[in-house]
């Protein structure tokens, strides 16, 4: 049996910006490029977005929801509109339904929909540990909930994958054996130039400056405070450095106010894809000191695409990409001192910085492009369908 159509379920999607959003978008985009009609079903996180639209030939449906924890956990709001939109999935008749993460209720909705449509149901895990909202009670209840919904998922999921080996290992915590890995990837090709006013607002100094960038949702667990502290600690001895923080989230207002008049630190807020790619093209070092249970952070791969030297932590699949100091520097989570030392290493040793960034670029181009990822994924799915290789 040949696969004809696919439907991807995800709790978060554009215009919300994050790793899962980019993963789903680029997967859907490349599926369409390889002649597989694709639909994305997500939640309507912003009131001004459309319930149904087509973006780069990908059909997108946004279901009504209630947002809690600053958009981190949308709750579906069943209504006449809700079920009318879901009927569009039935009309689409996908052969394969792809669920992204076990944790969100979009997984439950997608699983039920896959049963109705009798489609192959695949779940892709994006995490490598329990999520946190920095509240002991809610975290405890969240862990219990995650075990319950993981058990429920086994009722409708035919095969599990992870975006890294760390993710597949994490599934074993729930007594789930993964079928394989569908790595996060990058899109290789030209991007559109951002608007002139954006470029002018960045104000990157002369080539003598070393540009350091960070791009992620602005939550504590992504390590943004650690980076800001480390940068300020080394700045008095290295005045030729600049730091750009890209991203939105609960900490944006506080950080942007604190550093609004800082001459070497610029808080950019949410950037679109082309703006972020332009920033990376001007960046020397990407610092991502996360201690979040990552899958495979997109920023690591995008940094490699633009030959940025990378400093990160061994969270999730990062240690699978940067598996030696030939490719970058890994530091312990929550270590400001190690981050300072890593930054100083790159700043003082341009030869090593260029060598590590070049090695990482070659590795990522060879192994983590969406074109190759999707070809292998389709072969995996067809093998599952034709030979019954289900969990």
Image (cartoon, rainbow, N blue to C red):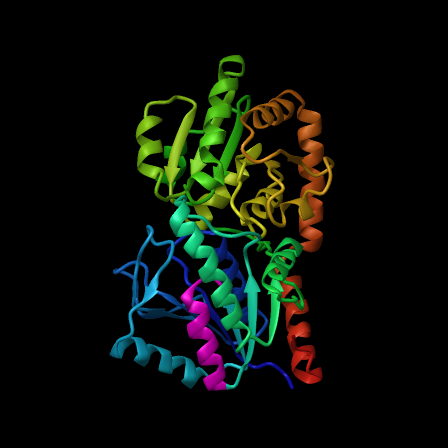
- Residue in the image at 49% along x and 30% along y: 227
Residue drawn at point x = 74 percent, y = 36 percent = 326
Q: Is residue 313 visible?
A: yes
Q: Count up the numbered dots.
A: 0
Classify residue 110 as left or right of residue 320. left
Residue at 49 percent across and 80 percent down: it is: 114
| Residue 178 versus residue 133 in the image, above or below | below
Q: What segment is highlighted magenta in the picture?
A: 102-117
Q: Is residue 324 above or below residue 90?
A: above
Q: Is residue 288 left or right of residue 329?
A: left
Q: Position of residue 199 (x, y in %)?
A: 41, 37
Magenta residue check for 22: no
The x, y position of residue 360, in whole percent, is 68, 42
* Helix, strand or loop: magenta stretch: helix
Q: Quadrant of residue 60?
A: bottom left
Instruction: Residue 391: give x, y in percent of width and height.
Output: 65, 75
Residue 106 magenta: yes
- Whether residue 193 can be seen here: no
Q: Residue 129, position in %: x, y?
A: 55, 52
* Residue that protrudes farthest toward the top in the picture: 237
Residue found at x 33% / y 77%: 85
Vertical placement of residue 339 versus 27, above or below: above
Quadrant in the rendering for residue 154:
bottom right
129 relative position to 266: left or right? right
Q: Quadrant of the N terminus?
A: bottom right
């Amino acid at each position: 049996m040949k696969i004809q159509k696919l439907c991807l379920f995800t709790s978060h999607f554009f215009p919300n910006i994050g790793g899962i959003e980019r993963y789903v978008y680029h997967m859907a985009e490349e599926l369409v490029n390889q002649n597989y009609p694709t639909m994305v079903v997500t939640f309507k996180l912003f009131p001004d977005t459309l319930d149904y639209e087509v973006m780069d030939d990908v059909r997108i449906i946004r279901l009504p929801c209630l947002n809690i924890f600053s958009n981190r956990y949308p709750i579906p709001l069943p209504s006449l509109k809700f079920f009318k939109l879901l009927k569009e999935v039935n009309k689409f008749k996908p052969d394969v339904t792809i669920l992204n993460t076990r944790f969100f209720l979009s997984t439950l909705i997608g699983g039920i929909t896959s049963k109705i449509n009798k489609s192959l149901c695949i779940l892709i895990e994006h995490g490598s540990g329990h999520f946190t909202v920095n509240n002991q009670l809610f975290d405890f209840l969240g862990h219990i909930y995650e075990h319950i919904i993981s058990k429920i998922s086994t009722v409708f999921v035919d095969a599990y994958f992870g975006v890294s080996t760390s993710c597949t290992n994490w599934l074993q915590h729930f007594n789930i054996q993964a079928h394989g890995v569908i790595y996060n990837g990058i899109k290789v090709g030209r991007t559109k130039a951002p608007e002139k006013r954006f470029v002018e607002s960045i104000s990157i100094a002369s080539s003598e400056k070393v540009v350091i960038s960070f791009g992620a949702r602005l939550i504590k667990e992504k390590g943004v405070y650690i980076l800001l502290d480390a940068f300020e600690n080394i700045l008095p001895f290295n005045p030729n450095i600049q730091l750009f923080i890209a991203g939105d989230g609960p900490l944006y207002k506080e950080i942007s106010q604190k550093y609004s008049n800082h001459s070497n630190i610029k808080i950019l807020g949410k950037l679109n894809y082309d703006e972020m790619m332009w920033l990376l093209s001007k960046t020397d070092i990407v610092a991502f000191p996360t201690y979040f249970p990552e899958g495979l952070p997109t920023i690591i791969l995008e940094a490699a695409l633009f030959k940025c030297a990378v400093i990160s932590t061994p969270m999730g699949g990062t240690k699978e990409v940067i598996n030696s100091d030939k490719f970058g520097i890994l530091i312990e989570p929550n270590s400001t001192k190690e981050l300072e030392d890593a930054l100083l290493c790159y700043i003082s040793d341009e030869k090593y910085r260029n060598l590590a960034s070049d090695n990482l670029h070659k590795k990522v181009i060879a192994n983590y492009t969406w074109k190759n990822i999707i070809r292998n994924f389709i072969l995996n799915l067809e093998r599952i369908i034709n030979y019954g290789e289900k969990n």
